[in-house]
Amino acid sequence: MARAQSSGGNRVDDIPLARRASPLRKPSRRELKLIALFSLLLAIFLVVFSFTVFSKFVKPGFVGGNVAPSADGRLLGHFPYQEVSKDSLIAVYPGLEIHRDTYEALRAMRSAAVSDGVNLVLLSGYRSIDLQKQIFYGRKSARNQIAIERAKVSAPPGYSEHSTGYAIDLGDATRRDTDLEVEFETTRAFRWLKENAARYHFVLSFPKGNPQKVSYEPWHWRFEGTVEALRLFETANEFRRAQGSFR
């Protein structure tokens, strides 16, 4: 069989493969920049996509591990609460909202406190379930706590009284160092609340030795002055009564 020849009479088979193949072209600087940009955009997309999927499937009740709600609906001591409708909220000041019924009672209570020389500071009110999720899971990375430990100081998402708009955190204007601290119990504000808060239908949610076994929070009060609010917290109140610890 005759061998293939080039137009010049040279045999193609005699040309080494390395010489016959075209050399690889190095990408230009502009192409390298485009590749780097594409890689960066792809990485950002994957991060955002992963977070979106995680947020979608992490439902209230999931706190890591195999923790599941108890027979009475509690998760790590906390009862479940639905998020209040935005239409029911009123802004106390920018960034802080509470249920409109809570607002009216709080305004009356703060006015009475001022008459007695006590200045109550509103530290926190309504929190969305998404915000509670950030707070709860943020504590894990900040404190390296397991879910049971975190739940003693912060309710899992979907189980916080703050999501109802009826729960508030209070402080003493003259003792800001005690904000959200157990030491708040040593202030004039707390002593006044213990004596007078019930007149305005506010209840201390987590007193010392509470049967839910949530950490003592002298600053955390909830409003129970309407039928709707009483119905919402009735399960928690029934649980207290059954455990022989009410109010």
Image (cartoon, grey):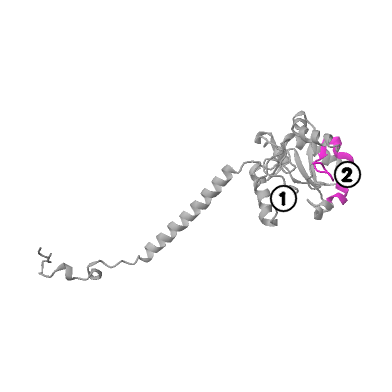
- Magenta span has 194? yes
Q: Indicate the position of residue 87 as horizontal and vertical percent values.
A: 66, 34
Amino acid type, mark 1: Arg
- Magenta span has 196? yes
Assess disc 2: are there few (<14), some (14-19) or many (≥20) residues with their C-alpha within 10 Å of its C-alpha. some
Q: Indicate the position of residue 168 as horizontal and vertical percent values.
A: 76, 42
Where 32 sits versus 128, above or below?
below
**Mark 1 or mark 2: which is in front?**
1
Query: What residue is drawn where x is 54% and y is 45%?
Result: 53
Q: Indicate the position of residue 138 as horizontal and vertical percent values.
A: 66, 52
**Mark 2 lies on residue:** 192
Q: Earlier in the sequence, mark 1 or mark 2?
A: 1
Q: Nearer the viewer, residue 122 or 162?
A: 162
Where 234 sits versus 115, above or below?
above
Residue 91 position by quadrant: top right
- Res 2 label: none
Residue 37 position by quadrant: bottom left
Assess disc 1: are there few (<14), some (14-19) or many (≥20) residues with their C-alpha within 10 Å of its C-alpha. many
Outermost residue, front direction? 1
- Could you tell me which quadrant the N terminus lies in? bottom left
- Position of residue 143 in the picture relative to residue 57 (left or right): right
Q: Secondary structure at mark 2?
A: helix
CA gap between label 1 and label 2 equals 30 Å
- Could you tell me which quadrant the C terminus lies in? top right
Q: Indicate the position of residue 140 as horizontal and vertical percent values.
A: 67, 53
**Mark 1 lies on residue:** 150
Query: What residue is drawn where x is 81% and y is 55%?
Result: 177
Amino acid type, mark 2: Trp
Q: Secondary structure at mark 1?
A: helix
Question: Which residues make up the magenta segment?
Answer: 184-211
